Amino acid sequence: MQYSQMSNPELAAEFNELKKQYEELKAQNLKLDMSRGKPAGEQLDLTMNMLKEVIGVCDCKSESGLDCRNYGVLDGIPECKRLFAEMLEVDSDNIILGGTSSLTLMFDYITQCMLTGAGDKPWSQQGDIKFICNVPGYDRHFGICEYYGIKMINVPMLSDGPDVEKIAELVKDRSVKGMFCVPKYSNPTGVTYSDEKIRALAALKPAAKDFRVIWDNAYIVHDFLENPDKVLNIFEACKEFGTEDYFIEFTSTSKISFPGAGVSCLAASDKNIQMIKKRFNTQMIGHDKLNQLRHAKYFKNLDGIKAHMKKHAALIEPKFNVVIDTFEKELAGTGLASWTKPNGGYFISLDTQQCSAMRVGELCKSLGVVLTSVGATYPYGKDPEDKNIRIAPTFPSVTDIGRAAEVLCLCIKLATIEKMM
């Protein structure tokens, strides 16, 4: 029976039973963390042999003949650029390699737009500027905007991508300078943009000619299924409309090899590549080429990456399954919550239906289960409906994530009856 159909005595009896379970769990002093999308230790172990690639080897030269221990090559060694070019389906000339973090590349690019512009006056000299934010979304994207005082406008994420009709209206405002997108297994919903949505984004006609979309393709190879979600190449879609300059694509090996020692990259049009290289020429001598060489030698090509990612999927998918199975067992048909069932990526998104997500977070914390800060999936940390919870199943063990999911379900039930009573 759904809670909405229960009498007050029935609700009280249910609440007392749930409270008893709550007290039993509290006495166990649990310490379960599903707050961030970190790889588990077993995933990191998969790539340990990579560290042997250039240790004790006299030849540390790239295929171009460059000694990777020395200065040189601003945009990355050719064999590693080729690896990313194959992954993103672009030409190697349109790739620039970065350090360990694509987030740093994104931040640096927004900084460039703020200080020197993106083909027009610097954004910082154009008065109040705005960014479209697909919600629920990635808190670190929002953090970049908040750092620079860029006003954020919420646009809802639908089942096949963002609300492009609303976006098309918003970009008629010249002060709207861009947006963040995670097109495959989006953070946190796990949604993959449909071809139609991507073509519609490519066809946008923004009033601002220095409009830029940060196309964060972080989970491009993070599949669970043999027939994974496909995402349309944004630059191919743009060719029809001549809008290639509006998009800057990012990815990294952070959740492929090592989050703390991976390689990041960006892909962009010829014009944008020239502008970014000009900045790089002043900003740095070059990134870690030995690390680039390690990655190129170890993975060799896209097939090598895909084979490696199957090993990740074998470790990750059971954790997603146990969370979703728990939700199905405890919450399906109750009207208490809805959740996504992604085919890859790192997150599950859950929406409470009848209670405060913030209250659920408080109850979970009191039982030793740490969630992503409730509200973090919206700009400024403010979920206007107080309903969304991002679940990151990858880091705990299968057993621990299963227990954490059970605690979460219990807390949703408790919070709902609290509100009803």
Image (cartoon, grey):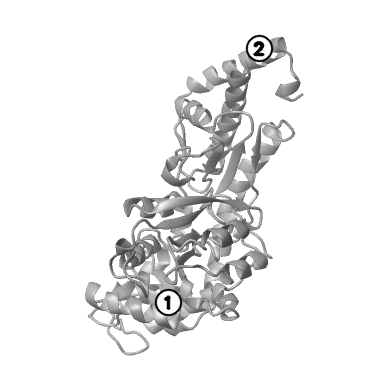
Residue holding disc 1: 296
Horizontal side of residue 360 vs 285, given as left or right: right
Which residue appears at 31% of the width and 84% of the height? 61
Instruction: State the image quarter where residue 122 is shown.
Output: bottom left
Crowding at label 2, few (<14), some or many (≥20) Cα neighbours within 10 Å? some
Mark seen at residue 12: 2
The kind of residue tagged 2 is Ala
Helix, strand or loop under label 1: helix
Viewer-proximal residue, 327 or 281?
281
Instruction: State the image quarter where residue 9 is shown.
Output: top right
24 relative to 175, above or below: above
The kind of residue tagged 1 is Ala
Q: Earlier in the sequence, mark 2 or mark 1?
A: 2
Which residue appears at 23% of the width and 80% of the height? 70
Which residue appears at 53% of the width and 35% of the height? 386
Q: Is label 2 in contact with label 1 (beta carbons under 8 Å)?
A: no
Label 2 – label 1 distance at C-alpha = 62 Å
Counting every numbered tag in the picture gives 2
Instruction: State the image quarter where residue 3 is shown.
Output: top right
- Mark toward the viewer: 2 or 1: 2
Q: Is residue 205 visible?
A: yes
113 relative to 393, above or below: below
* Residue at the farthest top position: 9
Viewer-proximal residue, 132 or 319?
132
| Position of residue 117 measured from the top left corner of the image (x, y, whole percent) | 33, 70
Which residue appears at 64% of the width and 47% of the height? 340
| Position of residue 413 measured from the top left corner of the image (x, y, whole percent) | 62, 25
Q: Is residue 231 visible?
A: no
